Image (spheres, rainbow, N blue to C red):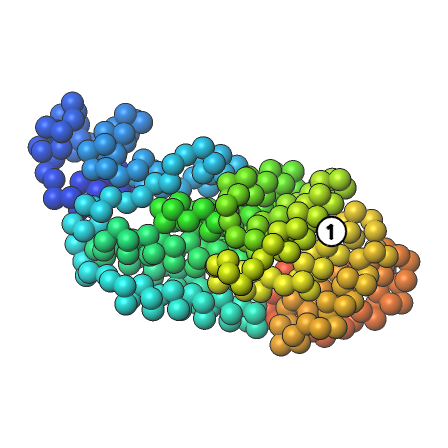
């Protein structure tokens, strides 16, 4: 049985509707519906739409998420937010989920997010991926109200963002992309556009670093466009991803415009404006680091050096992965400027820091900068 066939059957059975009753609701016969639900006949768009209308379930929920990033971004920009019908979620078999459990799950994702500050992807991936699978199972099998469902889907989206980041840090790029896009689907179901934008921009960051920088830039700009009403710090983060993808695309003007937008958005922040917890880490130092990295990509190492040096000097040394990464960028700035001895000394510092971590991202950076220092 295909996943789509199973989804059609599941939504019908969860609503307590028989095949005969379903046939009465549509112009399709009971035998045909049975063949569709067992995967013995090809499911066409009109079949999916019939189930969508019959049970008030968005087509996206039945089809499942696409794994083409640009297609997902386009559908998100032009489509309405799909939500699970309250009738369906209340008729599902399984335990009833209320606000207490959702609160516990929300607290757990915050704890895991902060754990990522000190534990690298190679060590954290199994923990976070297990957490994601468990939360997704709650969404699939439990019953809950529409309000609770939105909170649950938001938790799925937040755990997916963390799991995608951790998978990418562990060098599991294909898995990270799948997780990010699954998270976008969950964020849409939660009607949380800033979270969906964060997931898309996180994927654009990975794509800019190890994939197609042009596609990454388009994806990052789509995230900004789709979340124009996001809070100031969220907007700053989204513009950072545009700046990085633009720099990797060697778009000098686009990078500098994006960096200006980062500064403007960050200056708009206010204690009176709610910011989601997942932007807790973005501060002036982190913004300077990203600006420095972009300038290095654009061939301006001298301008990047003080930004990186000042940020590293005030950075929490317990965050070994980020410390090592930022040192690797400073070493690259020195290498670009022709200060090879300074580059080697800084890289040696980064290498010592890397011994405390299990991060494919950091190891790749050190290897790359090491190749520059051999010249």
**Residue 297, placed above or below residue 37:** below
Left or right relative to 86: residue 206: right
Q: Please name whichever residue, 40 or 322, is drawn nearer the observer in this view of the structure.
A: 322
Left or right relative to 349: residue 358: left
Residue occupying image coordinates x 31% and y 63%: 102
Left or right relative to 311: residue 58: left
Residue occupying image coordinates x 48% and y 59%: 274
Quadrant occupied by the C terminus? bottom right
Count neighbours of disc 1 (C-alpha within 10 A) and say few if under 14, some if 14 to 19, many if 20 or more. Answer: many
How far across and down, in percent of the image, does residue 131 sit? 39, 64
How far across and down, in percent of the image, does residue 144 sit? 23, 55
Query: In the rendered image, is residue 272 in sight?
Result: yes
Residue occupying image coordinates x 8% and y 32%: 20
The extreme top residue here reads 27
Residue occupying image coordinates x 74% and y 73%: 313
Query: In the rendered image, is residue 171 in sight?
Result: no
How far across and down, in percent of the image, does residue 285 sit? 69, 64
- Per the image, label 1 sits on a secondary structure element best described as helix
Residue bearing the label numbered 1? 294
Quadrant occupied by the N terminus? top left
Q: How many marks?
A: 1
Q: Please name whichever residue, 38 or 179, is drawn nearer the observer in this view of the structure.
A: 179
* Res 279 → quadrant: bottom right
How far across and down, in percent of the image, does residue 19 sit? 12, 35
* Res 311 → quadrant: bottom right
């Amino acid at each position: 049985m295909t996943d789509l066939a199973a989804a059609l059957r599941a939504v019908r059975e969860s609503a307590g509707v028989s095949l005969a009753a379903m046939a009465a609701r549509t112009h399709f016969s009971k035998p045909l519906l049975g063949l569709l639900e067992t995967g013995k006949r090809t499911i066409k768009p009109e079949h999916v739409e019939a189930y969508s209308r019959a049970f008030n379930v968005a087509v996206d929920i039945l089809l499942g998420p696409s794994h083409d990033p640009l297609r997902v971004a386009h559908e998100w920009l032009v489509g309405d937010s799909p939500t699970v019908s309250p009738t369906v979620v209340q008729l599902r078999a399984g335990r009833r989920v209320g606000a207490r459990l959702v609160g516990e799950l929300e607290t757990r994702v915050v704890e895991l997010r902060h754990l990522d500050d000190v534990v690298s992807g190679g060590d954290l991936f199994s923990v976070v991926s297990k957490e994601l699978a468990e939360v997704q199972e709650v969404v699939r099998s439990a019953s809950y109200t529409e309000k609770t469902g939105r909170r649950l889907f938001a938790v799925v989206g937040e755990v997916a963002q963390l799991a995608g980041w951790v998978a990418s840090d562990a060098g599991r790029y294909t898995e990270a992309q799948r997780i990010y896009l699954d998270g976008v689907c969950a964020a849409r179901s939660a009607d949380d556009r800033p979270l969906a934008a964060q997931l898309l921009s996180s994927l654009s960051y990975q794509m800019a670093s190890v994939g197609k920088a042009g596609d990454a830039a388009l994806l990052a700009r789509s995230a900004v466009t789709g979340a124009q009403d996001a809070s100031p710090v969220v907007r700053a983060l989204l513009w950072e991803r545009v700046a990085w993808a633009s720099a990797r695309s060697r778009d000098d003007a686009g990078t500098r415009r994006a960096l200006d937008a980062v500064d403007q958005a960050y200056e708009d922040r206010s204690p009176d404006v709610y910011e989601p917890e997942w932007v807790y880490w973005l501060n002036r130092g982190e913004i300077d680091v990203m600006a420095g990295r972009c300038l290095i990509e654009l061939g301006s190492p001298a301008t990047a050096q003080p930004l990186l040096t000042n940020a590293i000097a005030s950075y929490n040394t317990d965050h070994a992965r980020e410390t090592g990464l930022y040192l690797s960028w400073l070493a690259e700035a020195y290498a670009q400027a022709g200060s090879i001895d300074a580059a080697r000394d800084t890289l040696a510092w980064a290498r010592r820091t890397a011994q405390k971590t299990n991060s494919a991202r950091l190891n790749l950076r050190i290897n790359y900068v090491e190749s520059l220092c051999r010249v």
